[in-house]
């Protein structure tokens, strides 16, 4: 039994490097539909050039997440102190 003529062969379905890299951030963020995610993964399994791009992007994403957490903690500490000063000032003015 053969595939219907309008059904793409597995090699026709495999995306090229440009298409894979264009989907890099959506892939890493989990925002691709399952079919497209599977196409990206199939490309990464076969390609020698693209996996380093994805590995680097994942590293950058992890670094940003870590840096963002540190920054949030700094802002929270500073805002906590500021918040207490504002509340104290409001209590002193309130009847």
Image: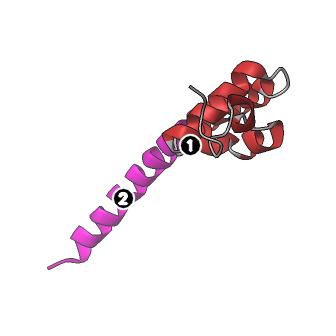
Which badge, 2 or 1, is on the more N-terminal residue?
1
In this view, 31 is above or below 42:
below
Furthest residue in direction left, as rendered:
95
Can residue 86 be seen? yes
Q: Tell me what residue is drawn at x 66 percent, y 26 percent.
A: 42
Which quadrant is the N terminus positioned in?
top right
Q: Nearer the viewer, residue 2 or 89?
A: 2
Q: Which residue, given by chain and number where applicable, does mark 2 sit on?
A: 83
Furthest residue in direction front, as rendered:
1
Q: Tell me what residue is drawn at x 80 percent, y 28 percent.
A: 50
Q: Tell me the crowding category of disc 2: few under 14, some 14 to 19, or many 20 or more residues within 10 angstroms, Cα based.
A: few
Q: Nearer the viewer, mark 2 or mark 1?
A: 1
Let me know if residue 83 is in the magenta part. Answer: yes
- Judging from the image, the colouring scheme is secondary structure
Q: Tell me what residue is drawn at x 69 percent, y 37 percent.
A: 13
Q: Write down the quadrant of residue 48 in the picture.
A: top right
Q: Nearer the viewer, residue 60 or 43?
A: 43
In the image, which residues are magenta? 69-95
Q: Are marks 2 and 1 in contact (CB under 8 Å)?
A: no
Q: CA distance from mark 2 to mark 1?
A: 18 Å
In-image side of 21 versus 71 (left or right):
right
Q: Tell me the crowding category of disc 1: few under 14, some 14 to 19, or many 20 or more residues within 10 angstroms, Cα based.
A: few
Is label 2 in a helix, a strand or a loop? helix
In this view, 79 is above or below 24:
below
Q: Tell me what residue is drawn at x 50 percent, y 38 percent.
A: 34
Residue 29: give x, y in percent of width and height.
55, 41
In-image side of 25 versus 65 (left or right):
right
Disc sitting over residue 71 in the figure:
1
């Amino acid at each position: 039994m053969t595939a219907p003529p309008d059904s793409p062969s597995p090699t026709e379905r495999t995306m090229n490097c440009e298409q894979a890299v264009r989907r890099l951030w959506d892939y890493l963020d989990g925002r691709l539909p399952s079919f497209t995610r599977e196409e990206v993964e199939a490309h990464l399994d076969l390609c020698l050039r693209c996996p380093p791009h994805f590995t680097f992007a994942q590293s950058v994403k992890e670094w940003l997440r870590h840096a963002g957490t540190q920054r949030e903690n700094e802002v929270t500490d500073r805002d906590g102190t500021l918040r207490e000063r504002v509340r104290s000032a409001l209590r002193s003015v309130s009847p």
